[in-house]
Amino acid sequence: MRVIESMKISIVVPVFNEADNIFSLLEQIERAMSQAQAYEIIYVDDGSQDQTGAQLIQALQKFPRLRVIRHQQRYGQSTAIHTGVRAANYPWIATLDGDGQNDPGDILHLIDVFTHKVQAQPNLWMVAGFRNQRRDASWRLFCSWFANTVRAALLGDETPDTGCGIKLFLRDKFLLLPFFNHMHRFLPTLMIRAGGAVISEPVRHRPRINGQSKYAVLDRLGVGVIDLLGVMWLQKRSRIAIAEEVKRE
């Protein structure tokens, strides 16, 4: 029996102004998860200003495993992910970007990797997707490479692509982490800081077909420097105690 047939997983998809991608991505998720024992799809609408909300209301009638949570205003991707994880019913979490560039079929691949690796690494908490063949503009590719190179050098987390939206992790471990805006870009570092192990695994990346990217490269770079300094501070203040329970004789 494949692992997917016996596991329970919540798929969290944060979205902002992605009306044209709602139905197509949901259909792909359902096809990918058809053999799962139990799963739910949690869309977190982060205060969209287009027809995303209306599309999700329609989708509720067609997709029985779909749950929709709406923010009153835009709070950002990290808050949307955090909202979805807190609302999740199942112990495994998979995240996907709502723009359709992540392939939902890779969720199964990450599950297989986790299952085979956790036997040798009992403290494995996350398998992070790694877009080794990205379908983005050259300028965006360069900026992402530069940011990942600097971040990896300063934080030492050995994660080649922290911005990849597709990840698989344990819900209870995620909820142990300190929450702050933009934390989703530092999840591997935060998991390691808390005592877990993280593996990066190549995944597919597709060109955006509908809609536009919500991120301005230069704006994100400025915020990223501040976030990076904050996470470095957290690393230096971290201390994991080595302890064991004393048993009765």
Image (spheres, rainbow, N blue to C red):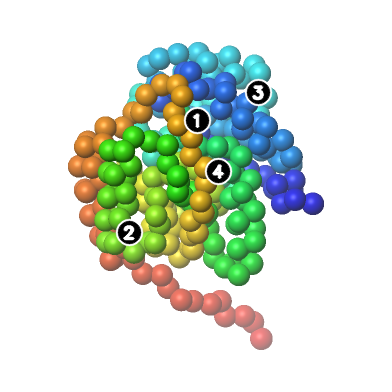
Q: Which residue is mark 3?
A: 63
Q: CA distance from mark 2 to mark 3?
A: 39 Å
Residue 170 higher or lower than 85, as above or below: below
Residue type at mark 3: give it.
Phe
| Mark 2–mark 1 CB contact (< 8 Å) | no
Relative side of 29 to 220, left or right: right
- Label whose residue precedes the other's in the sequence (1 or 4): 4
Q: Which mark is residue 152?
A: 2
Question: Residue 186's spot in the image, x, y percent?
Answer: 36, 51
Crowding at dot 3, Cα within 10 Å, few <14 / some 14-19 / many 20+, comes out as some
Residue type at mark 2: give it.
Ala
Query: Element at badge 1?
Result: loop
Q: Quadrant of residue 106?
A: top right
Query: Element at badge 2?
Result: helix
- Label whose residue precedes the other's in the sequence (2 or 1): 1
Q: CA distance from mark 4 to mark 3?
A: 18 Å
Residue that appears at 61% across and 39% down: 105
- Label whose residue precedes the other's in the sequence (4 or 3): 3
121 or 172, nearer to the observer: 121
Q: Which residue is mark 1?
A: 100
Q: Which residue is mark 4?
A: 94
Q: CA distance from mark 4 to mark 2?
A: 23 Å
